Each structure stands twice: as C-alpha cells, then as structure tokens.
Amino acid sequence: MSARLAHLMGATALATLCTYALLPQVTALAQTGGLDVSDLPQDAQMLLTADNLIYDNDQSTITAAGGVQIEYAGNNLVADRVVYDRATSRVVARGRVQIIEKDGNKIYADEIDVTDDFRDGFVNALRVETVDKTYFAAESAERSGGRLTTFNNGVYTACEPCRDKPGKPPIWQIKAQKIIWNGESKTVRFERSRFEFFGMPIAYLPYLEVADPTVKRKTGFLIPSASYNDELGFGVSVPYYLALSPTYDLTVTGTYYTNQGFLGEAEWRQRFDNGQYSVKIAGIKQQDPEAWSPNTVNGSEDGRGMIGSKGQFRVNPRWTFGWDVLAQTDKNFSRTYGIDGFSDTVQTSQLYLTGLDDRNFFDLRAYHFDVQEDVLDSSPSARDDQQPWVLPTFDYSYTPDMSVAGGELNLDINVQNIYRDQLSLNKVNGINPNDTSRIDGMDGLASRMTAEAEWKRSFVTSGGLVVTPLLQARGDAIYTDYDATTVNGITSFELNGTPVGSDMRSSYYRYMATAGLEARWPILFSTTSASHVLEPVAQIFVRPDAPYQDKLGIPNEDAQSLVFDATTLFERDKFSGYDRIEGGTRANVGIRYSGSFANGWTAQGLFGQSYQIAGANPYAAPDLVNVGAYSGLETDVSDFVGMIGFASPGGFAFSAGARFDEETFDVRRTDLKTAATVGAVTGSLQYAYIEAQPLYGFETDRQEVTGVARIKFDENWSGFASGTYDIESETVVKNDYGFSYGDECFIYSMTYSRSENRVTKETDHSFGFRVSLRTIGDFGTSSGDFGSSF
C-alpha cells in the first residue's frame, strides 16, 4: 500500500500542477499575476486528503474521490473528484471545484480539464473572485497554444455581489460573447460586448481591447474626455500612452475644439532611484481668435504654445533639489486651454534647494510669478509685466542642540535679490486720481541681506510666575539700483494727499537691538465638572527707532501684508517680512483663557492691547504701500484685539475674532466661523467684516458671508451646496451645487457653479460631471468644462 501511495502522491502532485494551469489566465483578467509553474517551489510538499484513492492500471488513471482537498505550496484545491489520465496526460477536476490561491484569490467551476503541459485546457461554469474585489464569470473557458485563453459568454465587473440578493445585477458590468486573454502580449480583448448599468445595456462595443489588469503600464489609448466653452467650442481629448521603459513613459494627447481647431500635447515622465521629473509641451494654431472679446490676449494670438517642466530629487535624506518652470508664447495660453499642472491664475516658476536637520533649516531658491490674465500688457489693469524676478532668495535658520547660557539661541539669515522690469503703480480713486498712492514694486534691482540672532530663557518662580528675558540683534545691508522712473515716483510720492520725505541712496545699512521681557502667570481654577486656566501675559520690548523708517528709499517687497489680531498680539515684530522692522519701545498686554468641561466641551480665548511707549511708532511711518494704515497699530495705543472659541465632542465648533477701536470700541474687523455635524448633515458658516480702507481703494465697508453644507442621504448618495454673498453689493459672488454617488466600484458626481462680478454683475456658469469605474478608469469633463458666459 505504501508503494502505491507513493506512486499516487507523485502522480497527484503532477495532477495538482496541471489543475492549476488555468489560474494564470483566470486571475490575470482579475488583476493578479496568477500561478505559474515558476512560482511553485520544486521542493514543496503536497498534502492530499480524500474519501477514496483509486489506482486503475487497466485505464491508466489515478482518481481521488469524495471530499478531495489538495494543498500545495500554499494553494488549495477542493473538488468532489479529481482524475489524472496518464495515457492522455489530462487532469480533470469535477463537482463544486474551488481553488484558493496563496494570495487569497478564489476560483469556482463545475469542471476543469487541462493537459499536463499547461498548453491546452477547458473550464466549465467558471467564476473568479480576487482579493481586490474584482469578479469574472463565464459559461466556459478554453486554453490553447499555451498563451491564449478564451472565455465564452463572459462577464466582468468590479462590483461586489449583493449578499441579500445574489441574483441582482451589479451596478455595472461588461458582458461579451468572447473574452480573449493573450498571455504573451498581455492584452484582454472583448468581442461583441455591451456595457450594462444596473442591468440595463447602455453601450454596445463590437470590439474593445485593453491592457491586462496585471500590467501596470502598457502602451495604448486612455479614457477620452469632453469639454465645452463658448470660445473654444466642443472639445474631445484622446490621450495615447506609450510605456517606453519601466522608468520612463510618454503621453500624447490630441484635442479637437470645434471653434479653435487641434490642440496637441505631449508629456514625458522619467523616474530615478532618488526622484523624478517631467516635461510637457502643448501648442495650437487658433482658427478663430475673434471668438474672444477684442483687445484681449486670447483674441490677439494665432499660434500659441508652452513648455513646462517639474522635477524633484532627494540628494540625500536631508537635502532636496527641484524645479517647477513654465515658458509660453503668451501669458494666458496654459490657463485658457487648461494645461494640467500649469493652469493656475498665478503660476510660480521656481528652482530650489532645501535642507532640513532637526531644528535647522536651509532654503535657496529663485522664482518668478507669471500672472495668467487675458488683458493686454497696455491695459492699466495688467499685472504680469510688473511681477519681479527673485534671483535668488536664501533662508537659513540654526538652533544649537546645546543650551547657551541656560537658554535657547537661534540664528537666522535671509538674503533677497529682486529685479523688476516695470514699475508697479497703483492709483487709488477717491484720494486723488492724479496721484500715485501706492508703489507696489520698484523697477530695477533691490538686494538685501539680513542676519539676526535671538536668545531667550524662561524662569519659573515658586509662585508659578513664568519670566522670559529675551535679547535680539539684527543687521541689514541693502543695495538698490532703481530706474529713473522709480526715483521720480518715490520723490513725488504722496500719502493721503500729503508729500512725504524720501532718501534715495544706492546702499543702506541698518541695525536693530532689542531687550525684551515676558511675564506669564497661569492660574488654575478647578471644580468637580470643569477646569479653567487664566493666564495674564505682559511683554515689553526696548529698542531704538528703526533707521530710515521715515524715508521711502528702502524697498518693501515682503512686508506688504499686515494683519493685527489676537494671533499676532504677542509677536516681537508684527511686520510680515524682513523689509520693515519694528522700532521703539512697545508693550503688549493681554489675558489668555482655556477651559475643559466634564461633558467634553472645550473653550479658549484671548483679549489684549499693544502700546507704543517710547520712540517713533513704525506703523505710523510713511510706506510706499501704506502698510501701517488701518492696521490698528498706527496709534500709540492700539486697537483692542480678541478671540474666543468653543468646541464640542459632537462635532460643533465656533470661533470669533475681532479688532475694536481703542476709543469707541467700534468693530473695525471681525471674523466669525462655525461648523457642525448633525446626523447626516455637515455644515459651516463664515462671516467676515472689514471697515472701509480708502488708501487701499476700498471706499466702503466690506462684508461677506460664506456657507457650505453637505448632506449624506444614505451610505452612497450625498449632496452639497456652497455660496458666498457680498452684503454691501448685494451680490451672490459664487455658488456651487452638486451631488455624488460612490461605492466600492463606482463613483459619479455632477456639479453646477455660478459666479457673478460684484461691479459689472456679469455672470458665468459652468457644469461638470465625473464617472469613475474601478479597474476601468475615469471619464467626464475636465476642469472648467461646460463653462459659458451669459
């Protein structure tokens, strides 16, 4: 018996391998590599269990019958009966055949019949379920020539069958008279197929060939997309992908617009061990530029094109080098035609090198801002030619690991070189239309190098008072080479109709030394249901006046944005950049609050004020862009600033921030935000108010409300809406609506957007949709599609 069993075991091992012959074909369609002979270890042990083992010398067959289970190299076969015919070299498994691969894929069939050389075979009533939840079924399957597998009357889907109603059609499926998988070319061809949605046929495809899902990269056509625009017309984009190598590829896309003609695009991508880069080119010869309004960039160009590149490489774990650059024939081509990755209204071209090590930081970059706008350069509202070249900017921050004199020392270096071809002027109506009230940027060269050191140390007294002394020193070297137009503009500059002084030099040297002291005294109050912390805070910074702060020769490129609120109350220098520095002796006083409650609610708040105690107030000094005006810091006693916030464990949150007049307590600026989740509804509401700022061109108050809401109807369906309303102009600036459906295999969304100009009241409408079929691909409108102006 032992000899017969050993003979049987050897034969059955061969039978097992033959039984698995169809696995590569079946699972390939289901996005798995399948089981190949080379995948099976030569020394693997086979375990066979069955109710009966029959060795028939007359028929030259070996049969395992009754509850057959075969385990080999992590793969399992279950069947009612397995027969190996040594004369014909065929293996037949019958009756509730189930194969479970070692990676978890499951294959079901009534009968599997294959040859022992894996070249030919037949499967009856086949069904496949893969680990990644893709499903395939066929009445029968045949394998021939060792490379072709044909599925007869096959069905493919990535939707999981309904457990309660197994016979219910999936959301989508592809049915085909024949599905032919070519193991050599790695392609799957559907013949006489139809696409069904919820069991209803919606598209007939006489022939469709796609890459084998096991192949991640293969040459062929990608899913097309459609678009519409009044000026461009209807557009259809067809991309073609070329998998040239495991490390690089090329995508070529042709788009035909009914109004403007053919747009060609090509994108080259290449990966390396330490990074990647891409190069994209696009071009068109517009056949109807007159479709756009006259005196616009789009309407003035015929041949248009661009070239752009992006890349990033890890020099080592700490250093990164990269770039993102764009060059185009005109300043609005990429935005007009929606070139992916280069269609932002403000496109930043840059080249950079960064390093990060613990608390130390290095950043060196050169960049240029491209404003993609449709107005001609001769228009007063044109902005692109006024954008500077930054060649380069450099930031370095170093904090030693060891303490210095018991405290923390930080060193910062900033270098900035800016070149601008054209003076950036901004004339604000309402002041004096004939005067230049803002010079946003100077034409010519402006360079600055700043070095700064700060030391601070905290002491805690026995009473809980936290005292932090601070010492800071800074030096700047500034070089300018302005055009004569800039010199004349600065010399004649008027602030609020009043001439101010100017000091035009080719170089400036300035310094600032600060001695500061901060005192905080956190006080804890606890009850059985809550804990509260009140923390009075006081700061004082003693320093001389900032050099040249009453003159206009020093450029201001990076400190043009100044917002004084509760978040900046305790900043040592409240200017947003290095070009302006804070001088004089200033004190900041306020009180913080934080609370935690037993029901899970939390609260926090801050209220305070700033005081210019001695020296000239830097926020009241003249500036080419009026940076200190309306800031709330231009008076020696600043406006009050405060904020408060609440949050609940149930998803509700509210915050409010405001700035109040120091004398009348009138609201100068406020920002209210709230968000909540109630059942299936999630929403947020935001209100913003800014008092009139005539020097910036805002003659009236600004008030705006923005709301966003999303509702989940059930597990799959959801809808959303958002809107922004300008209270002063009574204009719905922008609103969006849409709904979406999503499950494990199918996603669909549709959106509608409407925008309205606050002044002209012109409106723009756009529609879009997106369909995503898992394992098949996405198709729909591209960004900005179906847009039209009414």
Image: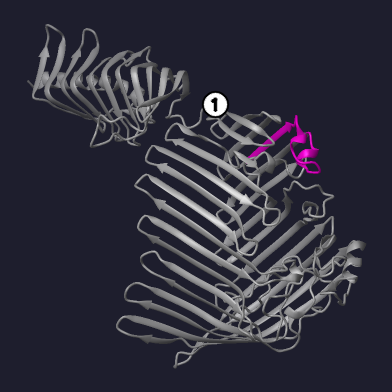
Going 73% across and 79% down the picture, which residue do you hit? 619
Q: Is residue 107 left or right of residue 623?
A: left
As drawn, which residue projects farthest toward the front?
A: 730
| Quarter location, residue 742 | top left
Protein image colouring: one colour
- Image location of residue 390, percent across then percent down: 75, 57
User: 399 and 572: which one is in front?
Assistant: 572
Going 90% across and 70% down the picture, which residue do you hit? 492
Q: Is residue 240 left or right of residue 75?
A: right
Amino acid under disc 1: Phe
User: 42 and 386: which one is in front?
Assistant: 386
Q: Is residue 41 visible?
A: no
Residue 103 painted magenta: no
| Quarter location, residue 10 | top left
Q: Which residues are magenta?
A: 278-302
- Image location of residue 338, percent across then percent down: 64, 40
Q: Which residue corresponds to mark 1? A: 221
